[in-house]
Amino acid sequence: MRIDTCFFCGRPAWPSKGITFCRNDGKSFRFCRSKCHKNFKMKRNPRKLKWTKAYRKNAGKEMVVDSTLQFAAKRNVPVRYNRDLVQRTVKAMERISEIRARRERVFYKKRLAGKRAREIASARKLVANNEHLLPRLRGSEKRRIAELAAEQGVDVAELEEKTLAGVRASKKTKAFGGETRRLRVRTDGGVEEVTEQFEGVGEGDEDQDDDDFDDDDGMETD
């Protein structure tokens, strides 16, 4: 049983499924579904549609050069039936699929490595550039400052300016992602910065199953 690939999107086109289009020059095109057939008739370029294999390969989102991909090539060489050869071929196909899946996971992790750090860096840069749009003080801090000013008999605006002056002197950017920094007014009138950590946030939740990955996997074929 031969499983053809869709001419437009690259997905497998199973026997008795999909659409086959024969052109006047005798060339046939196999499509896995009517969506691919309609896009082909509209003369759209598969490299410009994000849901096709051609786009993903062109954008570097999938493996292109790998030894396991060579086994998927068509071979129109007739071979005499041999039961032992068929059994070894089936076992080799299972082994090749396993190796390809493991290499695809490693390729995916390498491609997305450092994405979390880049997102945090861009978020901090955005906040640093637009810090004037953020509220000056939290509502709870304003209430504490008002209570403290009432106890000490000091003007509320003056105490707020003193608090903000302490923040500007520290020159520390607010953190995002795994921690939160907030200001706390002490009973003696001083200001301290408190950092709270969130549990379960970080980049250490990757699978550990691929640590023993060996790129030199041996494969025997006939």
Image (cartoon, rainbow, N blue to C red):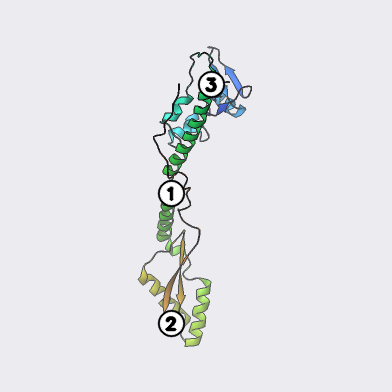
Closer-to-camera residue (99/37): 99
Label 2 element class? loop
Left or right: residue 212 compared with residue 13: left
| In the image, residue 192 above or below residue 176 | below
Q: Are marks 2 and 3 in contact (CB under 8 Å)?
A: no
State the image coordinates of residue 132 (x, y, percent, origin top left): 43, 64
**Is residue 70 at least partly visible in the picture?**
yes
Which residue bears the numbered disc 3? 86
Q: CA distance from mark 1 to mark 3?
A: 45 Å
In primary-sequence order, the first of circles 1 and 3 is 3
In primary-sequence order, the first of circles 1 and 2 is 1
| In the image, residue 208 above or below residue 199 | above
Q: CA distance from mark 2 to mark 3?
A: 83 Å
Is label 1 or label 3 in front? Answer: 3
Amino acid at circle 1: Lys
Closer-to-camera residue (83/13): 83
| In the image, residue 42 above or below residue 122 | above
Which residue bears the numbered disc 1? 115
Q: CA distance from mark 1 to mark 2?
A: 42 Å
Closer-to-camera residue (174/48): 174
Is label 2 or label 3 in front? Answer: 3
Q: Quadrant of the C terminus?
A: top left
Which residue bears the numbered disc 2? 189
Is label 1 or label 2 in front? Answer: 1
Closer-to-camera residue (27/65): 65
Q: Quadrant of the N terminus?
A: top right
Label 1 element class? helix
In primary-sequence order, the first of circles 2 and 3 is 3
State the image coordinates of residue 216 (x, y, percent, origin top left): 39, 34
